[in-house]
Amino acid sequence: MSEPYVIGTFCNSYLYKMKYYILLLFFSTQVFIPQLTSQTIGTTLNTEDALDGYTFFSPFSGTKAYMVDNCGNLINEWDRGTRPGLAAYFLESGLMLRTYKPSPVGPFTSASNSGGIELVDWDNNTVWSYELNTPTQLSHHDAVMMPNGNILMLTWQLIGQAELIALGRDPNEIAPQGFAWNERIIEVEPVGTNEVNIVWEWNIKDHYIQDFDATQANFGVVSEHPELFNINLPELDSPNSHSDLDYNHFNAIDYNEALDQILISVRNSDEIWIIDHSTTTEEAAGHSGGRYGKGGDILYRWGNGSAYERADISEEVLYGQHGAHWIREGADAGKILIFNNGNGRPGPDFSLIEVLNPIQDEDGSYPVPDTEAFGPETSEWIYGDGVGESFYSAFLSNAQRLPNGNTLINSGSPGDIFEIDANKEKVWHYVIPLFGDTPLPQGNDANNNSTFRAYKFPKDFKGFEGIDISPGEPIEINPLPCDVFSSVENKMYADKISVFLKQGRLEISNVLGESLALSIYDMNGALVLEQPLVQGVNSVDVLSKNSGVYILRFVSEDGTSFTKKLPLFY
């Protein structure tokens, strides 16, 4: 028998070695046509356990937003002519809420600049837009639509050297430019087609603490005030973004209507914060008032107790996190989902998805420990720390708990979007098939396809009401046929196809009474080996291949296909 025809390489090696393997049998009624082109982009894995819906994303280096189905077929495309800056959402109203980058006019030099925000309909018409892009102010990163139709926006304001010193900043730590980027959150009411009313605001400079200069404002003991931010916080382990100018670097914002609270991801101190939204603007600038009686002070913070001197830096949990938000529905509703990038994590680079269940009183407030950091010590649920779960995105990224209980993970830097089930098994995988705005041919490696966020919606999502959806072709050039790997065990074939690992070879017994075509895929869907199988015993050499989990696809003479999922270890 001839050696197998290898057309790819096995990926995702495992550090653990096992003396046995587990064989699970799966079946698909789809007809499979073997291809010699490796499946590298677009939909590379599609199972029936994936949520049947549409995935929305807006690549960082392009000017368009996209929605695709599980096979990667294009559902809709919005060509905006400007790059995102950075967030984009598809709303229940059927509109897209998108931040964007107009030409910059101020000294804000971050890749996370925004400056513009817009609402766009399904047909790419601008319904409303607004720009906050001046020499002293700029919107950035993220914005969130509130149930009342208002929008919460992250913004930077320039704050000068004299004011920084008066607030207690060490003059030797002020950037040579003589200013910093001060974080401010504003709630805007859209007016007309391009105006706003600012109805509420919160400003970090009202909530500083410092132990550097007793003659200046905000002097105190940092560890005694976890509700405040240390304006002289030293640079942490995480590689920070413009930390000499941008002391906080908020990169995500979310709103909880039931609690009337705002959740912020604070990248440059590797934390998440929660603040009270029920305050007036005047109360938000102080330390009392509002539903929780603490004005605009930090109600809860988690991820790095060393930021307020209540833990050692070695106890840090979050590293450059993104995409923090409250889970809206399901068994984990009310908990917080975080994409923990791992940027700056000691040791090997890897990311985690974490579900945090904050310690909370019945009234929605958060008990403040006397001397310890806010709890809990660890997340309630983690993905990425198990065998076969490794992935990494240094920047960008988010995760989403789906209505069927699965979790969508957007590994934003490499442009990988995948879905896992409740057992942490990968059930769908999509590689954004773009270089900027340019579609790539199938078989190519994708790059310059990063995306800040990705979201998936079931087909009965309210935003699709009244929209005639007709799937088009996949975005990539020369797409391969879309196949569905079924997770339903096929008893008909269970006793007629057996696979054993013996001295680096797969011994495959075929007693179906006909020849078969074998194709082996890695768990990213890349085709790595093809070989015909005759009746009887067949031998397939896998000794030179890395350990991993693979899908063995068998195609009968009449075109029927069926699969085995094979964890293969040596």
Image (cartoon, rainbow, N blue to C red):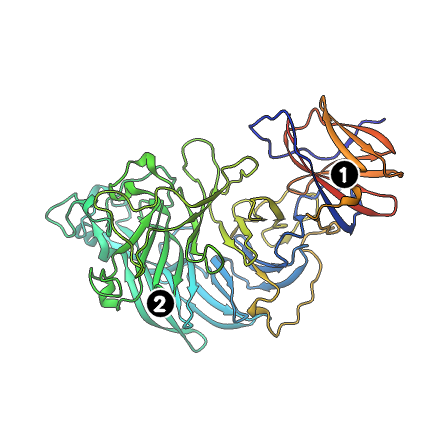
Residue type at the position of mark 1? Ser
Q: Position of residue 520 (x, y in %)?
A: 73, 37
- In the drawing, what numbered circle is on residue 139? none
Give the number of marks: 2
288 to the left or right of 334: left
Element on which disc 2 rests: strand
- Can you say which quadrant of the picture contains the N terminus? top right
- In the drawing, what numbered circle is on residue 519? 1
**Which residue position holds label 2?**
187
Q: Position of residue 366 (x, y in %)?
A: 29, 54
Q: Position of residue 223 (x, y in %)?
A: 21, 44
Q: Position of residue 542 (x, y in %)?
A: 72, 27
* Residue drawn at point x = 47 percent, y = 35 percent: 349
Q: Nearer the viewer, residue 66 or 403?
A: 403
Residue type at the position of mark 2? Glu
Q: Nearer the viewer, residue 411 or 522?
A: 522
Whether residue 314 is situated above or below residue 502 in the rendered picture: below
